[in-house]
């Protein structure tokens, strides 16, 4: 799933991103309110983990504006405040769940899994990513183009999912490395290019129009036009 973390404690934000990436989620991080709101309003996230106390704009206001804008991303609110009134204010602003700091990482993962399962039940049938005639089924873990089933490795699937969640957007090698791989790749810096080659051979070879495109000197993008 695609998850946004809005957390001004940078170490906590990095830890949450690492842990959630290990669970095979695609994760973006913002460390202040305005950036968090702009990303959340893009309506590209399945789940937003939202700290209540943030620079520039607090989490309650971000959540309110998300719901006013009809953004349906699941929201898990994080806070150092544990009173009943604080939990109620978080939930009435539009949050789906509320977790008090400090928390065990196992509890956060359990909350995330429960929220995403609930979202899957409510949006059954909407777990398909599509770019042109290429589709990716997040539940069945299947990829098809023009009805032809395409076999991908786990890493190729994760790479394609990241590209399909950002259709038409040029993604740099460092962005791809950060999201799809979880370790330092300086020693094998061409690994992104290698996997792009593998993926292109599977999703474009034999089809009239290529979807996976190289933007020279910058990175790659997936688009139908």
Image (tube, rainbow, N blue to C red):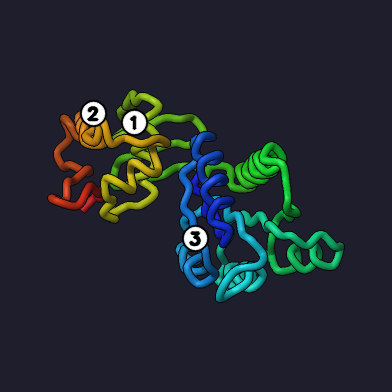
Which x, y percent locates residue 192?
26, 36
Residue at the far bottom: name it. 56
Q: Secondary structure at mark 1?
A: helix
Image check: 58 left or right of 172?
right
- Of circles 3 and 1, the one toward us is 3
Which x, y percent locates residue 173?
27, 45
The answer for how far apart the CA atoms under marks 2 and 1 are is 8 Å
Residue bearing mark 3: 30
Q: Is residue 159 above or below residue 80?
A: above
Residue ID at (37%, 29%):
155
Residue bearing mark 1: 156
Whether pointer 2 and pointer 1 mark residues with C-beta atoms closer than 8 Å, the reply is yes
The answer for how far apart the CA atoms under marks 3 and 1 are is 26 Å
Q: Secondary structure at mark 3?
A: strand
Residue 89: quadrant of the picture? bottom right
Mark with earlier residue (2, 3): 3
Residue bearing mark 2: 198
Residue 62: quadrant of the picture? bottom right
Residue ID at (59%, 73%):
65
Which x, y percent locates residue 183?
40, 35
The answer for how far apart the CA atoms under marks 2 and 3 are is 32 Å
Mark with earlier residue (2, 1): 1
Is 57 in front, or is 93?
A: 57
Residue ID at (30%, 28%):
148
- Of circles 2 and 3, the one toward us is 3
Q: Secondary structure at mark 2?
A: helix
Residue ID at (61%, 59%):
50
């Amino acid at each position: 799933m695609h998850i946004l973390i809005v957390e001004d404690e940078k170490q906590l934000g990095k830890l949450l991103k690492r842990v959630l990436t290990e669970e095979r989620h695609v994760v973006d991080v913002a460390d202040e309110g305005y950036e968090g709101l702009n990303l959340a309003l893009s309506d590209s996230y399945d789940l937003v983990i939202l700290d209540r106390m943030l620079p520039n704009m607090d989490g309650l206001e971000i959540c309110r504006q998300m719901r006013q804008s009809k953004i349906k991303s699941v929201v898990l609110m994080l806070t150092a405040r544990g009173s009943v009134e604080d939990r109620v204010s978080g939930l009435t602003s539009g949050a789906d769940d509320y977790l008090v700091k400090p928390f065990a990482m196992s509890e956060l993962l359990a909350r995330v899994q429960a929220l995403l399962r609930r979202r899957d039940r409510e949006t059954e049938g909407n777990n398909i990513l599509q770019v042109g005639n290429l589709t990716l089924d997040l539940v069945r873990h299947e990829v098809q183009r023009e009805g032809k089933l395409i076999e991908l490795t786990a890493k190729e699937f994760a790479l394609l999912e990241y590209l399909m969640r950002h259709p038409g957007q040029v993604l740099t090698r460092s962005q791809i490395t950060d999201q799809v791989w979880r370790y330092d790749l300086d020693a094998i810096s061409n690994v992104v290019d290698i996997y792009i080659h593998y993926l292109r051979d599977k999703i474009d070879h034999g089809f009239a129009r290529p979807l996976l495109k190289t933007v020279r000197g910058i990175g790659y993008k997936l688009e139908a036009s």
